[in-house]
Image (tube, rainbow, N blue to C red):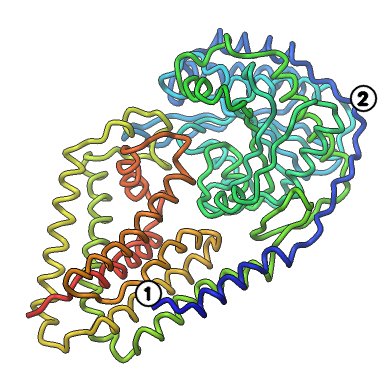
Amino acid sequence: MFHTRNLTIFLMLAGLLTTACQAQATPQIGFDPADLKFSGGRAFEIETEFVTRFPDRHSGQENNRLAAEWLLDRFTDSGWACSLDEWEIVNYSRLTPLTNVVCRLSGESGREILIVAHRDQFPLTIQGADDDASGTSILVHLAEIFGAEDDRPYTLVIVSTDAEEYGMIGSKRYMDAHPNTENIIAGISLDSVGMEFFDGLDMELVGQYRNYTPIWLALTARESAKAAGVGWDIYLRAPFDQITDQAAPVSFMDQGPIVAAGVPAIGFIGHEPVEYADLYYHLWHDPDDTLEYQSAETLGKSGLTAEALIRQLMSMESFPQESGEYIYFDGSGRTVRGAPLWIVFIGFVSLFFFGSLRAGKPDGWRNAAPHFLGLWLPLLASILLLYGFVEVGLMHKYHAYPATTKDPDLLNPRWLTIILFLVGLSLFLYLGRRFVRQYAGAGIQPTHADIKSLALFIIALGGVYVIAINPFSLLFFLPLLFWFLINGRQGSARGLDILFFALGGLVVYALIYIFGFTVLRYNFAFLWYMMYMFSTRMIGFYSAIVITAIVAAGLTMIVNPPRK
């Protein structure tokens, strides 16, 4: 059983988070607010011309290419050195041409400040005014402002990215092709920042699959906006949101690949009041995302925030060196990072190692191993089956994670594919059980203690893997503590073991849905999306090995081993 002593130890470890905080330095403002020049009226003029001339500009369409050429001319006219970066990807199983517009404005130092906004739009929108003509118009106006100035301590780079809606492919392309990402001081992404009802800006700090922006940049952005007199709240993520962001690092904005490359970056996005939440969701990736809901005042405040942050970064001679996981508490201005967090991470995983030793002895693992393999290998084979579905056309092939939000391909599952997957999984499980019965049934029948000991050890090894790649993802291991309560009950009491197994698994599923997909409102279609998460390698094969091993370990504790 999960001994109360282990729970006490875990609570003591968690308590370190509240006692081991470090004071976080407050950024010192170094720019003169009188130098700010951003005009919301000018940005609105640019946005109006942009969406009028280039509607229907989603990736691969002619208007997307024409918009790129138009932006190239505008940036060049403002004094920037520009080029087009062209390449192709496969999306919706079709070859899709993409184009980034990359422009540089040299400074005294070759170190770069990067500003990006995506030019593409959701395929079913028409104007795509807020998402993301708003960010594009701010990008163009910032290019005008800084192109007219002579003295720049650092080099400025602006990128109009393509295929943001298909997994931030354009910004990832820029980072992958960059000769030295350590030369980039910081990145700023502007996305959906023009709605008339916005009352502030949120800051997205999460990287694409890994990393999280250092807190110094977020605090610098907020203090810069205050100094500029923007009059808006620039919202920091709450401590719990920081944990969940780092536990499920799936970005939906262009800062994601920048942060994943180890560069501090912020994704600015409009913050809507609660009473406008439903309207904002309706307008997001919808044909109604038009100029009607855009505001020069909102664009002005968003653009002024971005300009203030750029000028503050240019005023700084050095930049804080922060790395690794952290939790920032805004109320006290203190941060938890380093050893206290790692003690909690390692201590939590150690619970499963200790539980394994308490449940049984490693001598019995040999007897329990065939039972585990008879469940794990079929689950792993089902992942390979999904890869096969992509190759034969039963599921679309995508360059990154599938499609985009509100996409019909995700909201309308292919039921034939789902049925074939379930049939295949059932067949694999049948063959796995039959194999164990045929070739391992003559061995010593494993006891529940043997099975539980091996299962908890496998989960612990999975925890070590998670610590190595993203320790905050151990959050999804918390519900697995229910599995300590599985004790090999028989008869009517066996239902209690099944309940504990279900609680662990279903809570993990709920956590994934709540942290990563609630805002998308996928509901049942989330199951279909999860199939795509594996088939497109959004969840890599090594991670799939670990996930299926943990699921199989849990199943071994409630499924009786086959008898010959």
Q: Is tag 1's residue or tag 2's residue first in the polypeptide sequence? A: 2
Query: What secondary structure is found at the residue carrying circle 2?
Result: helix
Residue 104 or residue 215, whichever sits in front: 215
**Above or below, 434 relative to 33:** below
Residue 476: where, in percent of width, then height? 46, 59
- Residue at 10 percent of width and 79 percent of height: 563
Q: Nearer the viewer, residue 518 or 53?
A: 518
Left of 24 or right of it: where is 400? left
Residue plotted at (48% across, 13% down): 288
Dot 2: within a 10 Å radius of its alpha carbon, few (fewer than 14), some, or many (20 or more) residues?
Answer: few
Kindly identify which residue carries mark 2.
34
Above or below residue 235? Residue 293 is above
Which quadrant of the figure has residue 496?
bottom left
In the picture provided, is 57 more to the left or to the right than 389? right
What residue is shown with label 1?
458
Q: Are marks 1 and 2 in contact (CB under 8 Å)?
A: no
Q: Position of residue 137 (x, y in %)?
A: 66, 19
Asked if residue 124 can be seen in this view, the reply is yes
